[in-house]
Image (cartoon, grey):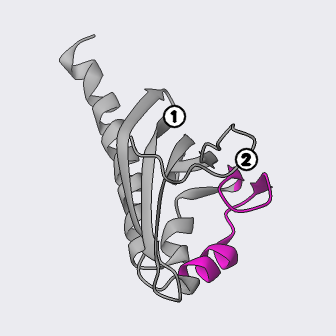
């Protein structure tokens, strides 16, 4: 591959990383609308909150969760890998979320996040997102939110 043919891939990689950073900024600002703009209509979402899967970004549910936190929600991504093939991209890595409960207790956890994005006239938009935490397989079935990379 030549330098010229790699340039569009680098630009796409930077654009997708920018979206992930903008979503983190939307969490910090506690602004669900700022986050929602990066999701395509009908996106398939399997995040930490029930149900197992839904269609479309839940603006009202996200805003209610953000408003229910006792502090801004800090989101940081680690080990992010972005793979682009034409108008399709996959971004996956580990995500650390930290905030406070309404009663002031610190809440923090690592999760695994995979996002599939499609390029349209509106730019890159998330069409599928899967966020999960592992669970202890010792019979307790407790979420393993205490793990660190």
For residue 90, the mark is 1
Q: Quadrant of residue 75?
A: bottom left
Q: Which residue is mark 2?
A: 141
Tell me, for residue 80, which label it has, or none: none
Is the C terminus in the top left, top right, bottom left or bottom right quadrant? top left
Residue neighbourhood size for the residue with mark 2, other residues' Cα within 10 Å, grouped as few (<14), some (14–19), many (≥20): few
Q: Nearer the viewer, residue 143 or 68?
A: 143
Q: Secondary structure at mark 2?
A: loop
Between residue 98 and residue 6, name the one nearer to us. Answer: 98
Classify the position of the N terminus by image quarter: top left
Residues tagged 2 and 1 counted as in contact (Cβ below 8 A): no
Q: Position of residue 31 (x, y in %)?
A: 49, 79
Residue range in magenta is: 42-66
Closer to the camera, 121 or 31? Answer: 31
Whether residue 89 sits left or right of residue 148 in the image: it is right
- Percent position (x, y) of residue 30? 47, 79
Rendered location of residue 92, percent (x, y): 48, 37
Q: Nearer the viewer, residue 139 or 126?
A: 139
Q: Is residue 61 magenta?
A: yes
- CA gap between label 2 and label 1 equals 29 Å
- Check the image and name the residue furthest to the bottom: 103
> Quick one: label 1, few (<14), some, or many (20+) residues within 10 Å?
some
Residue at left offset 60%, top offset 80%: 63
Can residue 23 be seen here? The reply is no
The answer to whether residue 133 of the structure is visible from this angle is yes
**Residue at point 68%, 51% (across, down):** 142
As helix, strand or loop, the secondary structure at mark 1 comes to strand
């Amino acid at each position: 591959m030549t330098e010229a043919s790699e340039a569009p891939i680098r630009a796409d990689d930077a654009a997708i990383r920018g979206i992930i950073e903008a979503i983190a900024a939307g969490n910090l600002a506690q602004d669900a609308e700022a986050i929602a703009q990066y999701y395509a209509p009908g996106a398939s979402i399997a995040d930490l909150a029930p149900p197992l899967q839904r269609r479309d970004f839940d603006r009202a549910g996200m805003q209610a969760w953000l408003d229910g936190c006792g502090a801004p929600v800090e989101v940081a991504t680690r080990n992010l890998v972005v793979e682009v093939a034409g108008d399709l991209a996959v971004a996956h890595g580990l995500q650390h979320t930290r905030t406070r409960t309404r009663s002031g207790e610190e809440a923090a956890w690592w999760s695994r996040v995979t996002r599939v994005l499609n390029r349209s006239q509106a730019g890159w938009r998330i069409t599928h997102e899967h966020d999960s935490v592992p669970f202890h397989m010792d019979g307790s079935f407790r979420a393993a939110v205490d793990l660190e990379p």
